[in-house]
Amino acid sequence: MELRELADTGVMLPEIGFGTWKYKGGIAPLRRAIELGAPFIDTAEIYGTEKVVGEAIKGQSTKVFLATKVSGSDLKYDQVLRAADASLKRLGVERIDLYQVHWPNSRVPIGDTMRAMETLVDAGKVRFIGVSNFSRDEFEAAQEKLTKYRIVSNQVEYSLVDRDIERDIGTFYAPNKITVIAYSPLARGALLAQRKRGLEVLNAIASAASRTPAHALNWCLRHPCVVAIPKTDKVARVDEDCGASGWQLTSEQVSALDEAFS
């Protein structure tokens, strides 16, 4: 498994981790990910999966980079602090590596939320601050309210069929050394169910490279500041997804996929 630096923190993440939205796989797939050198696990208070993640990492939490999120409906100062404590309890850990604001909420001053996030870092309950589903403007507004720390990541939907973030990767996130965490990098299966022409090209490239269509994850990883967090309930698919690391599509293959899925 290839590693990439989280922002400019010096902390190295596997370029493929695993998400747990709508996850029903129990502990085995998550433990397999840890075994394969992909111990980056992402969850959230609203997913209802923090307890199973806690069970999966029990006894080996020091090997895991653990990320979770505070709900966009819990962003007032005291709410953030309570939510973090509840997540810590469900996860069975003393510190969250990456605590993320799940989505922006215009009804709550972002300064209140960021002040709470800094309080959590100061208290040793959170290691790094992140956001999720933030536009570039929302990201910058949140960063402006921090006085001691920086936002190290933005978790957004990114795949061959969801590219809204793509322009900002090159013009904002990469130049400023901010990590983009790509969720649903296989478009929740849509890559295998949509766009007949796209699927034909994807299958042809996978066959030529002795890969599988799931290795389209590698398309996201062509940007050095991006890490991908697919979700799977199956141990065998964990192995397959991890196989998307450690190699690169050729520029011609990237262009062919871009054209096929445009």
Image: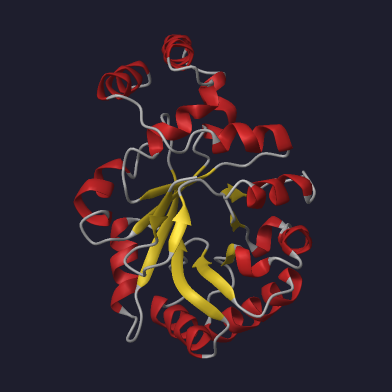
Work out whether residue 43 or residue 82 is closer to the camera in this orientation and state it: 43
Work out whether residue 51 or residue 138 is closer to the camera in this orientation and state it: 51
Q: Quadrant of the C terminus?
A: top left
Image-based side of 253 in relation to 176, left or right: right
Q: In the rendering, at what x and y percent does residue 251 appear?
A: 26, 25
Name the residue: 56% across, 41% down. 230
To which quarter of the image does residue 152 belong? Answer: bottom left
To which quarter of the image does residue 54 belong? Answer: bottom right
Name the residue: 23% across, 55% down. 172
Work out whether residue 35 or residue 43 is closer to the camera in this orientation and state it: 35
Q: In the rendering, at what x and y percent does residue 145 appear?
A: 33, 80
Image-based side of 234 in relation to 74, left or right: right
Compared to residue 14, the image places residue 199 above or below, namely above
Is residue 133 in view from this perspective?
no
To which quarter of the image does residue 60 belong? Answer: bottom right
Q: In the rendering, at what x and y percent does residue 228 appear?
A: 48, 45
Here the colouring is secondary structure
Work out whether residue 150 or residue 227 is closer to the camera in this orientation and state it: 227
Is residue 174 in view from this perspective?
yes
Compared to residue 212, the image places residue 65 above or below, namely below
Compared to residue 64, the image places residue 25 above or below, namely above
Q: In the rendering, at what x and y percent does residue 92 appear?
A: 74, 73
Name the residue: 25% across, 43% down. 167
Total numbered labels placed on residues in the image: 0
Image-based side of 88 in relation to 198, left or right: right
